[in-house]
Image (cartoon, rainbow, N blue to C red):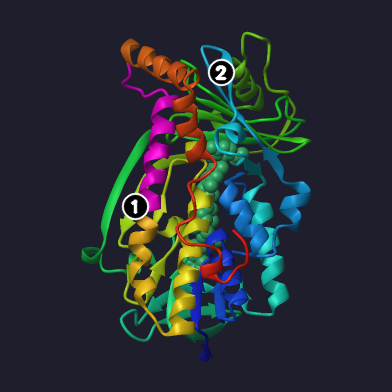
Amino acid sequence: MAVHKTQVGIVGAGPAGLLLGQLLHLNGIDSVILENRTRDYVIDRVRAGVLEQGTVDLLRAMGVGAGLDSRGLRHDGLYISVQQRRHRIDLADLTDGRAITVYGQNEVVKDLIDARVATGRPLNFEAGGVSIDGLDARPVIRFQHAGAEHEVRCDIIAGCDGFHGICRPSIPADALTVYERSYPFGWLGILAEVGPSSDELVYAHHERGFALFSMRSPTVTRLYLQVPPDESIDNWPDDAIWDEMVTRMMSLDGWKPNIGRIIQKGVTPMRSFVAAPMRHGRLFLAGDAAHIVPPTGAKGLNLAASDVLVLAHAVKAFYQRGQSDALDQYSDVCLRRVWRAQRFSWWMTSTLHRFPDDGPFDLQRQIADLEYLTSSRAAMTSLAEQYVGLPPEVSFESAGLSGG
Ligand code: FAD
Ligand code: DHB
């Protein structure tokens, strides 16, 4: 058995684990990151695309904003389509110049892996049989790598291993309260090799179900369709996907998505989930390991970034001033933002999707809700300030960064 020592053991090399590792490094705090998948798998996984203003500011302040600045697409607004009419919401105008940036999660992860490798600190892919122990006083992470057994002894464990990871299930069930809601639908997502026909996202309400127009670059379009929750992708030949996308998105002015070769497709279920508290002894959960939001509000990746900013601030106070009060407050501070994001994501989801039990009353109510949203400056401002992201819970300076 090989024994390693570090200050913070990080399980998971998704956005949460990699961001935390970099924030700790910038404060001179050592960490080991363990990931059970391969490097290519982690980079190639197609997921989120919308970064809040605060996430963009954070990546820049951490010195990992070069890719984002050269290839990210800043969007000052978005469209809501209702009754086949597109209404623009001017995010920047309604929020004093704040905006979102479309930059694929896989690009963010690639940039963070490069930054980690440049620090020379450990990042182990393909770690097998990862388990954690000693959460009350002496945390250890055990894993297998290249046929050998390893043990990492640390002061703190950061559980950044996503919804299906091992950290949350390592907490005794009676020490966690779980809040959960599943939705009677999922999203079929595609990437298509075709230039986007709109410069900004289109969230489309349609009586056949929700559809979302997004993009990854000037030559790649990303689109989503509401489908039944356990829908098989085999039921959706490419022509059927395009027919349904065009039906749900086409507006009376003739706008519709450009059609091209589909290069990736898959179905994702949707749920709202919160496990509280986000701490057990010396284990701190961050990102999807602690909470899941339905993707309609584009909040998941941004919440992961916000959790690790709070955690980095608390870990810094612990090592630099010997204070554990910020660690003690970690869960409460994060959960306030998590619940706001849960509410926003639930509201976006329920307002835009068709529910199987809905009748004609519900359809008219949704249309009225969306027509109010797109005609009232107060309602648009409320959406805009939540969509571009609420202010950070802790200052960048307190997490050891300049600016922000
Ligand atoms: P993950 O990205 O899940 O990373 C966890 C890591 O831990 C993974 O690499 C995993 O392989 C690893 N791991 C798991 N188990 C173990 C183990 N036992 N040992 C070691 N490692 C382990 N969010 C947004 O903000 N905006 C969006 O537009 C958006 N769109 C989305 C669209 C889709 C289709 C999906 C599926 C998600 C979307 N999200 C979006 C959500 C976003 O992708 C997640 O919230 C984000 O990935 C969370 O990051 P994380 O690091 O917490 O978890
Ligand atoms: C994307 C994903 C989302 O969940 C969303 O709300 C907006 C855009 C995207 O993948 O581009």
User: Residue farthest to the front?
Assistant: 96
At 55% from the left and 37% from the top, the residue drawn is 95
Which residue is at the front of the view, 198 or 176? 198
Disc nearest the viewer among 1 and 2: 1
Q: Quadrant of the C terminus?
A: bottom right
State left or right for residue 368 relative to residue 247.
Answer: left
Spatial separation of the CA atoms under disc 1 and disc 2: 32 Å
Q: Report crowding for label 1: few under 14, some 14 to 19, many 20 or more residues within 10 A (C-alpha).
A: many
Task: Determine if the magenta segment contains residue 349.
Answer: yes
Residue count near mark 2 (Cα–Cα under 10 Å), binned few <14, some 14–19, many ≥20: many
Query: In the figure, 187 relative to 211: above or below?
Result: below
Main secondary structure type of the part rendered in magenta: helix
Secondary structure, mark 1, is: strand
Rendered location of residue 94, percent (x, y): 55, 32
The answer to whether mark 1 is within 8 Å of ligand 1 is no
At which x and y percent is residue 181?
Answer: 32, 41
Label 1: which residue? 274
Where does residue 10 sit, x and y in percent of width and height?
Answer: 50, 73
The reply to whether residue 266 is in sight is no
Residue 334: x, y in percent? 39, 58
Q: Is residue 27 above or below residue 66?
A: below
Residue where numbered disc 2 is placed: 248
Q: Amino acid at mark 1?
A: Val
Q: Nearer the viewer, residue 185 or 284?
A: 284
Tell me the residue at 49%/77% (across/down): 316
Give the camera-side residue of 280 and 226: 280
Residue at horizontal 56 percent and vertical 12 percent from the top: 84
For residue 151: magenta? no
Magenta stretch in the rendered image: 336-358
Q: Taking 114 as reference, is 188 left or right? A: left
